[in-house]
Image (tube, rainbow, N blue to C red):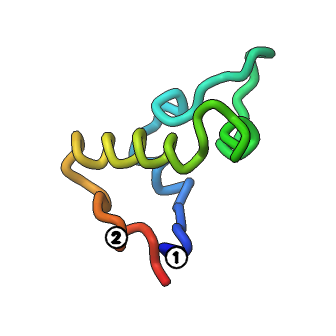
Amino acid sequence: SMGKVTFNHKAHQELLKDCKICHHKDEAGKEKDCGSCHTKDSKVKAKDAFHNNCQKCHKEMKKGPTGCKDCHKK
């Protein structure tokens, strides 16, 4: 195991100001927390969604962690 990832949702809300940057809506048109859609059985797993979206955003903004051990703390 790589270790636990902590995430400060409030800090991201304050910085980004647009929930749609990270969240998308389900078929009913409601925003959900990531784990409710991105499960181990879903087409796009949570791990893949986080790695793709979070790392990409951090690299583009040149801000935030991008390496494995930067996010995964033991």
Judged from the image, the secondary structure of the residue bearing numbered disc 2 is helix
Q: Which residue ends up furthest to the right in the rendered image?
A: 28
- Residue 51 appears at what percent x and percent y? 43, 48
Asked whether 57 or 49 is in front, the reply is 49
- Residue 59 appears at what percent x and percent y? 23, 46
Q: Which is more N-terminal, label 2 or label 1? A: 1
Q: Quick check: 59 left or right of 9? A: left
- Residue 12 appears at what percent x and percent y? 46, 50
- Residue 22 appears at what percent x and percent y? 50, 36
Asked whether 74 or 12 is in front, the reply is 74
Instruction: Estimate the spatial distance between the alpha carbons at disc 1 and disc 2, rounded to whole Å.
Output: 11 Å
Three-letter residue code for mark 2:
Asp
**Residue ID for mark 2:** 70
Q: Residues within 10 Å of mark 1 (few under 14, many from 20)?
A: few
Q: Which residue ends up furthest to the bottom in the rendered image?
A: 74
**Residue ID for mark 1:** 3
- Number of marks present in the image shown: 2
Three-letter residue code for mark 1:
Gly
Judged from the image, the secondary structure of the residue bearing numbered disc 1 is loop
Q: Quick check: 30 left or right of 52? A: right
Residue drawn 49% across the image and 47% down it: 50
Q: Which mark is residue 58?
A: none
Q: Which mark is nearer the camera, 1 or 2?
A: 1
Q: Quick check: 67 left or right of 30? A: left
